Image (cartoon, helix red, strand yellow):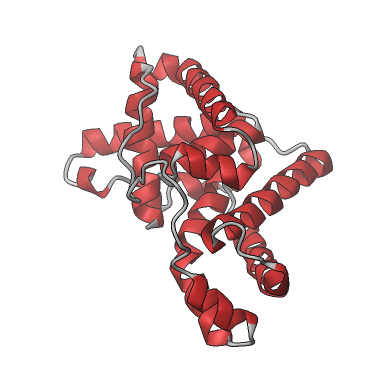
Amino acid sequence: MAKRGCALLLTGVGRRVASGRTTPLLSSHPRLPDAPRQPDPDADLVDRARHGDTRAFDALILKYGDRLYGLVYNMTSHKEDTHDLLQEVFSTAYRSLPRFKGKSSFYTWIYQIAVNRTLNFLKKRKRRSGLSLNDLDSSVQQDPALVDWTAEANPERQSNLNELQKRLNEALQKLSDSHRTVVTLFDIQGIPHGEIAAILKISEGTVRSRLHYAHQQLQTYLQDFWDR
């Protein structure tokens, strides 16, 4: 899942930024329409986990682990930080299960925990070290999960994708945390506007506004690449 989502970051987001389009792009995860809330498909697993069934909670981690990894990694660009944050997210979720009342889906609830933990971490990281782009995980530029594997037989295309990968990662890190979050959730994770609004506890209008601004910023940051 993470590999597909990151490849999308290079191909889908890159094309959209270059053209200035703001319509939804295809994601590695099926994009569901904004619709009235359906019964939580995880209700049985959640209920069992709340009553001490650790295997049920393990099943929830298995179901959402890859997607949460992609979310946190694209927000932090650092593997070790991502692993540490995921441990915190799962630990917090497990301890908080008795207080989960089912007012939202488990999926939305654990995403809220992941986003909040990651945003708090990013704020602390900035205050602590004044992190620059050069300090980010250098492996993000060579990670096979970030390479469009369909280009392997075409060295020239692979070289262009590697350069786009580097530029796009740098451009994403220049966005504010709130704008990078909506780009990650919508463009990479394929989550619809309504679900993003529920996760971030903001209006759908605010989600759309942040996406529009973020796409404009990415287009500006990458303009020299497209003009070459």
- The answer to whether residue 72 is above or below residue 97 is above
Q: Position of residue 120 (x, y in %)?
A: 75, 47
Question: In the picture, residue 23 is in which quadrant?
Answer: top left
Furthest residue in direction left, as rendered? 153
Q: Residue at x 42, y 38 (%)?
A: 187
Q: How many marks?
A: 0
Residue 194 placement, left or right of 227: right
- The answer to whether residue 43 is above or below residue 103 is below
Residue 165 placement, left or right of 199: left
Residue 111 placement, left or right of 66: right
Q: Position of residue 147 (x, y in %)?
A: 34, 46
Q: Residue at x 48, y 64 (%)?
A: 40
Furthest residue in direction right, as rendered? 128
Instruction: Look at the image and tell me whether residue 184 can be seen.
Output: yes
Observer-nearest of 48 and 66: 48
Quarter of the image that includes the N terminus:
bottom left
Q: Residue at x 36, y 32 (%)?
A: 24
Quarter of the image that includes the C terminus:
top left
- The answer to whether residue 187 is above or below residue 86 is above
Q: Position of residue 124 (x, y in %)?
A: 79, 45
Instruction: Look at the image and tell me whether residue 136 can be seen.
Output: no
Q: Residue at x 60, y 29 (%)?
A: 175
Observer-nearest of 196 and 25: 196
Observer-nearest of 25 and 12: 25
Q: Position of residue 44 (x, y in %)?
A: 49, 77
